[in-house]
Image (tube, rainbow, N blue to C red):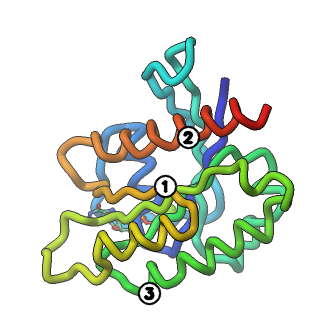
Amino acid sequence: MIYKIILIGDIGVGKTSIILKLVNNKFYPEYNKTLDVDFYIYDIKSSINNTNITKLQIWDTAGELKYNSINESFFNNADAVIIVYDVNNYTSFNNVNTWHNIIKNNIKKNIINTIPIMLLGNITNSNIDNRKVLEKDAYEFALNNSMLFMECSASNQNRHKISDAFINLTRKIYVTKKHTN
Ligand SMILES: Nc1nc2c(ncn2[C@@H]2O[C@H](COP(=O)(O)OP(=O)(O)O)[C@@H](O)[C@H]2O)c(=O)[nH]1
Ligand SMILES: [Mg+2]
């Protein structure tokens, strides 16, 4: 079984960093702009289903709509979407709504409710004074919009929170599919 998961969100919120931390367990402090779209494969080892391994095909995006690769065909066959924002950057949280609309406009109406969406707040490790988005506000937003919610940091020593986020999302995909098939 392979699940296609798409990461979207503003430039610089840490989409690429989150994926590289999950896949390579490495953090790269220097900024490398993602130019278009790229995908990575990651095996989730947990007993979500009877096979114990779920392959994730994780799609990274540039975060700039001018690249225009985020369209209907890009969302085709998506099993879940993660919207990433930076907890230290209020604009990136404000734009979550825009990203949510892009999802709604590009996924067919009859299946939109079967595609789990996760809201993921990144860069929680920075100075507490830098934080602009409260965890409870983001949680409330996620709840009101039927999204899963987690916070994480791609620069943490370990990747537990990030792998938990992907495990939770994978579980949600699995359960949703079971109820719709
Ligand atoms: N301190 C810190 N920096 C981060 C974290 N996640 C990403 N960054 C940095 O933020 C910048 C943008 O990250 P990147 O993954 O390229 O963002 P993207 O444009 O959304 O793919 C890079 O310099 C990263 O090293 C984090 O959790 N903590
Ligand atoms: Mg990137």
Which amino acid is tagged 1?
A: Leu
Q: Is residue 89 above or below residue 60?
A: below
Alpha carbons under labels 2 and 1: distance apart: 9 Å
Q: Nearer the viewer, mark 1 or mark 3?
A: 1
Residue 32: x %, y % from top left = 43, 64
Q: Nearer the viewer, mark 3 or mark 2?
A: 2
Q: Residues within 10 Å of mark 1 (few under 14, many from 20)?
A: some
Which structural element holds mark 1? strand
Residue 129: x %, y % from top left = 14, 82
* Identity of the residue drawn at 76% across and 57% down: 112
Q: Is residue 126 left or right of 26 when viewed as pictured?
A: left
* Identity of the residue drawn at 24% across and 65% down: 124
| Towards the viewer: 67 or 119 | 119
Residue 33: x %, y % from top left = 49, 67
Q: Residues within 10 Å of mark 3 (few under 14, many from 20)?
A: some
Q: Residues at badges 3 and 2 in contact (C-beta under 8 Å)?
A: no
Q: Quadrant of residue 34?
A: bottom right
- What residue is disc 1 on? 148
Alpha carbons under labels 1 and 3: distance apart: 20 Å
* Identity of the residue drawn at 71% across and 79% down: 66
| Disc on res. 88 | none
Q: Is residue 4 left or right of 159 when viewed as pictured?
A: right
Residue 91: x %, y % from top left = 44, 87
- What residue is disc 3 on? 91
Q: Residues within 10 Å of mark 2 (few under 14, many from 20)?
A: many
- What residue is disc 2 on? 172
Q: Quadrant of ligand 1?
A: bottom left
* Identity of the residue drawn at 29% across and 66% down: 123
